[in-house]
């Protein structure tokens, strides 16, 4: 075990050098480092056509077609603030010491850890935050971590935040309500806009202005990377722009036309809309925030925490989440088409991810707040010009704005445009397959994103964190995915992978062993239990352990509840079989692995270029 770990550390340094060379080749036409466009979508499960869900997302699918997409990627905690602080520092919640929204700022509570944008900024990039990148408030020092992470103060939309007091959704009687499902006429909204539209507009204006700056010297020969000075980019400053969208987070407030894409009779129920068998009560999340909507016929106060969502609302909720997703797809499309129009698409790496998943009725759950795969699994897409788009032929444009209503209007299913039929299916009719693009279903985690983006941009790759890394500013508790990306895109690479990670790790805190008022988002001083969950290709195994919220001690070895799902017989995690006598041995083994934790599930690298073994779960579409 220890040997693998030391070896993995050593290979990181080899990579930094070798892949610096390899990725440098990709940008042969550029005179500088690539830009980065980093797209974060809130509460976004892999609800994309290209991930096999019945959602109409032609713009994100078009990006996926020229990218590599990871289909088994997981957040470290299914809650916005801890997940974002985790992937932006590349450390797990136990290391950032943030498991709630606001109890601490990691630089004060855990260590002065370098963030992903900060790393780019310190390496001469102009870094910009638009929308929800960090979670706002104390966890990012009330400044979105400006100035350490960003060259200029973060942009936040000016229109009112959605709170219980903010009634913005028109009801049948013409009055305004605080609804969970909220299609709106945008012109009637405050300032005639929506927060995510404001974010798109800020992104478009930043891209246009950077493009103007860059054009000032076009054709004047090669130049070195120039750092931004006094917060202002020079014509040779590469950028790192993070754009964080709020939807499809609750409430589902979106431009009403997107509802037309999803007639209610075409919406299907979740595949497993029933309670999990033998689920320990501590694992249950009772989606109280959904119950608060004035349109949901369930009481949020004094509730029966296991009251199921009526079928009618089950379908309406799915319709609203999908419509809000198609809205965000359009906003993403506007940013990507601007990137191309401004001549920046050829040397900009694009990353798209969700901060965690969202349960749309699976297990009768309607939120995140748990360790179910439906809550931790996220879309994760990397677009690297010259590398992930090499099999795609572009006629004229890389990222033309795609219209989700196209087929409805033209009725021309033969056109090479995502065509929509009313079962909610969207389809590419091109000869390259229904959803082209590179695909990896290897197990990966959001902590892997930071080292991956650093390596793709030829920046120093953070080394693996030592066990006590509180004093180490730059290190990772993940691993760069570049060897996988090279493997799958058939790119020559000196470092080979013989086995990728064999497990991903997520966790969720609880204040009590039974559902209660504060179960879903306990503040740090109320956390009494932590559910540590490990997913392998065969199992998900979880232990619920006592957690001391003053010294963060965990009572390993003394689980109060366990969960085991065996995917060969139960792919959707419907039956907890941890307490069945025939599983005693496998529970013992998984418990041992879980105790060893993520360091002992790391990939195994091999510098001998002659032998490459390909784990069977890898495939390329
Ligand atoms: C944290 O790190 C930044 C960047 O290296 C440095 O400027 C700052 O002084 C550090 N803060 C503390 C409290 O050490
Ligand atoms: C956090 O905010 C406080 C108060 O505005 C400020 O004094 C402090 O320097 C900030 N910390 C960092 C690391 O930026
Ligand atoms: C939206 O509201 C504006 C302003 O009241 C109105 O002119 C327009 O017709 C409305 N659109 C729809 C589709 O109802
Ligand atoms: C938690 O840790 C604190 C500080 O070490 C200790 O005083 C307290 O007794 C612990 N609580 C429990 C329940 O073990
Ligand atoms: C942590 O908890 C374990 C098990 O409950 C206990 O044996 C150990 O002494 C505790 N350590 C600290 C530092 O409190
Ligand atoms: C995961 O891989 C490590 C080596 O990296 C190995 O020691 C461990 O047994 C594997 N665990 C499982 C569950 O396969």
Image (cartoon, rainbow, N blue to C red):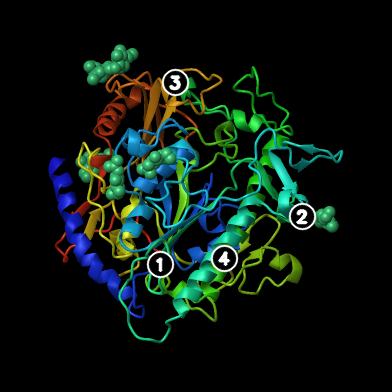
Residue at (24, 66) in percent of width and height = 19
Which quadrant of the figure contains the C terminus? bottom left
Q: Which residue is mark 3?
A: 526
Which of 92/501 is in front?
92
Residue at screen point 64% across, 23% down: 307
Residue 612 visible in the current orientation: no
Residue 147 in percent (x, y) is at 40, 51
Q: Residue furthest right?
A: 173
Q: Report the residue marked by disc 2.
A: 187
Determine which of the numbered discs, if any, sits on residue 35 in the image: 1
Does the beta carbon at disc 2 come under 8 Å from ligand 3? yes
As drawn, 370 above or below 214: above
Of the numbered discs 2 and 3, the one sitting upstream in the chain is 2
* Residue occupying image coordinates x 66% and y 44%: 160
Q: Dot 4, how many residues are within 10 Å of its Cα: few (below 14), some (14-19), or many (20+)?
A: some
154, 522: nearer the viewer: 154
Q: For residue 620, what is the image quadrant?
A: bottom left
Indicate the quadrant of ligand 6 in the picture. Answer: top left
Q: Are marks 2 and 4 in contact (CB under 8 Å)?
A: no
Quarter of the image with the N terminus is top left
Which of the two discs, 1 and 2, labels the residue nearer the N terminus?
Answer: 1
Say which label, 2 or 4, has the lower sequence index.
2
Residue 192 locus on image (x, y percent): 73, 54
Secondary structure state at the residue bearing disc 4 = helix
Q: CA distance from mark 4 to mark 3?
A: 42 Å
Q: CA distance from mark 1 to mark 3?
A: 42 Å
C-alpha separation, residue under disc 1 versus residue under disc 2: 35 Å
């Amino acid at each position: 075990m220890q040997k693998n770990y030391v070896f993995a550390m050593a290979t990181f340094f080899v990579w930094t050098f070798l892949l610096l060379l390899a990725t440098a080749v990709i940008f042969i036409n550029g005179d500088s480092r690539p830009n980065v466009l980093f797209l974060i979508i809130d509460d976004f499960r892999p609800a994309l056509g290209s991930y096999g869900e019945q959602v109409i997302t032609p713009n994100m699918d078009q990006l996926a077609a020229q990218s590599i997409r990871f289909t088994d990627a997981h957040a470290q905690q299914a809650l916005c603030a801890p997940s974002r602080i985790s992937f932006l520092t590349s450390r797990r919640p136990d290391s950032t010491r943030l498991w709630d929204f606001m109890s601490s700022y990691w630089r004060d509570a855990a260590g002065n850890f370098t963030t992903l944008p900060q790393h780019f900024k310190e390496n001469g990039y102009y870094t910009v935050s638009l929308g929800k990148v960090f979670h706002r408030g104390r966890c990012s020092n009330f400044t979105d971590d400006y100035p350490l992470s960003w060259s200029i103060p973060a942009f936040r939309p000016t229109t009112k935040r959605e709170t219980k007091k903010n009634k913005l959704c028109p009801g049948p009687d013409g009055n305004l309500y605080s609804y969970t499902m909220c299609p709106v006429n945008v012109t009637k909204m405050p300032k005639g806009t929506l927060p995510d539209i404001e974010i798109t507009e800020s992104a478009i204006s930043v891209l246009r202005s950077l493009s103007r700056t860059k054009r000032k010297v076009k054709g004047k020969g090669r130049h070195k990377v120039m750092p931004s000075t006094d917060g202002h980019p020079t014509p040779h400053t590469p950028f790192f722009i993070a754009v964080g969208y709020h939807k499809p987070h609750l409430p589902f407030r979106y431009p009403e036309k997107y509802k037309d894409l999803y007639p209610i009779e075409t919406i299907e129920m979740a595949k497993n809309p029933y309670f999990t068998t033998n689920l320990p009560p501590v694992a249950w999340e009772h989606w109280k925030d959904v119950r608060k909507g004035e349109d949901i016929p369930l009481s949020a106060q004094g509730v029966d925490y296991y009251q199921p969502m009526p079928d009618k609302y089950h379908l309406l909720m799915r319709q609203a989440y999908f419509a809000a997703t198609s809205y965000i797809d359009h906003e993403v499309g506007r940013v990507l088409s601007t990137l191309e129009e401004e001549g920046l698409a050829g040397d900009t790496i694009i990353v798209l991810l969700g901060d965690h998943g969202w349960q749309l009725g699976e297990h009768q759950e309607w939120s995140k707040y748990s360790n179910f795969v439906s809550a931790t699994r996220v879309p994760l897409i990397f677009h690297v010009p010259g590398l992930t788009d090499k099999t795609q032929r572009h006629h004229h444009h890389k990222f033309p704005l795609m219209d989700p209503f196209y087929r409805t209007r033209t009725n021309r299913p033969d056109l090479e445009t995502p065509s929509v039929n009313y079962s909610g299916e969207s389809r590419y009719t091109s000869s390259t397959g229904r959803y082209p693009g590179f695909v990896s279903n290897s197990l990966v985690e959001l902590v892997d994103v930071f080292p991956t983006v650093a390596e793709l941009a030829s920046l120093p790759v953070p080394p693996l964190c030592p066990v006590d890394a509180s004093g180490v500013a730059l290190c990772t508790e993940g691993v760069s995915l570049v060897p996988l990306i090279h493997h799958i895109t058939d790119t020559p690479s000196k470092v080979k992978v013989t086995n990728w990670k064999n497990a991903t790790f997520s966790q969720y805190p609880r204040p009590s062993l039974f559902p209660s008022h504060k179960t879903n988002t306990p503040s740090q001083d109320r956390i009494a239990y932590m559910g540590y969950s490990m997913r392998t290709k065969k199992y998900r195994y979880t232990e619920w352990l006592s957690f001391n919220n003053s010294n963060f001690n965990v009572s390993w070895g003394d689980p109060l509840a366990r969960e085991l799902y065996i995917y060969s017989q139960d792919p959707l995690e419907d039956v907890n079989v941890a307490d069945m006598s025939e599983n005693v041995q496998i529970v013992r083994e998984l418990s041992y692995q879980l105790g060893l934790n993520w360091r002992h599930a790391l990939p195994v690298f091999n510098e001998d270029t002659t032998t490459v073994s390909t784990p069977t779960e890898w495939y390329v579409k």
